Image (cartoon, rainbow, N blue to C red):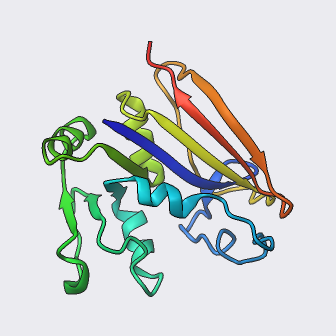
Amino acid sequence: MRATVYVGTSLDGFIARPNGDIDWLGSGSFDGPNENYGYKAFLDSVDALVMGRSTYQKALTFGEWPYESKCVVVLSTKGVTIPKEISGSVECMSLPPSEVVRRLSARGMQHLYVDGGKTVQGFLAVGLITHITITRLPIILGTGIPLFGPVAADIRLRHIETRSYPSGLVQSRYEVIRE
């Protein structure tokens, strides 16, 4: 099973403000004319998304559900409310990452999109992330929710490519090296 992180961060490595706000990410001030950062093609390549409760709750505020009919698994020990209009494709699990991957793999899923700070950190900690794409935006927040946290051991990566865009965004792709 391939499990990929595809995320935008501030230059100083934050995925959100301390209160979870991502207003700086979608403000449009970083959108250059005719720039394609590859997100749609990436999303088309995944079978399912696995995200934490906070990320899910933030996605619910976007107005239109951004994942169409993709299978979405929300990890939460507290449970979540799932609106009727997306209930056919969204489910909640309270399981460790390895069991989530096992169950989704048994359902034929081959490529997971793992999203949300704690979720990414949890999947990384047990060696389930295979690829990471980070798009760094030219903004320094100074504080916030970091993409990465403490790790028990070094996690080595193999650089695949880095692209820069006229708007100032820099996108790097990596493969996680399994030792």
171 versus 28 height, above or below:
above
The quarter in which the N terminus is drawn is top left
Q: How many marks?
A: 0
Residue 145 appears in the picture as rendered: no
Residue at 70% of width from left, 77% of height from top? 27
Left or right placement of residue 61 versus residue 77 in this view? right
2 versus 147 height, above or below:
above
Residue at 69% of width from left, 71% of height from top? 24
User: For residue 59, what is the image quadrant?
Assistant: bottom left
Image location of residue 8, percent across then percent down: 62, 56
User: For residue 96, what is the image quadrant?
Assistant: top left
Is 64 in front, or is 120? 64
Image location of residue 156, percent across then percent down: 56, 21
Residue 45 appears in the picture as rendered: yes
Left or right placement of residue 159 versus residue 44 in this view? right
Image location of residue 135, percent across then percent down: 67, 52
Is 12 in front, or is 173? 173
Residue at 74% of width from left, 48% of height from top? 12
Image location of residue 109, percent across then percent down: 24, 47
Is 105 in front, or is 98? 105
Is 60 in front, or is 141? 60
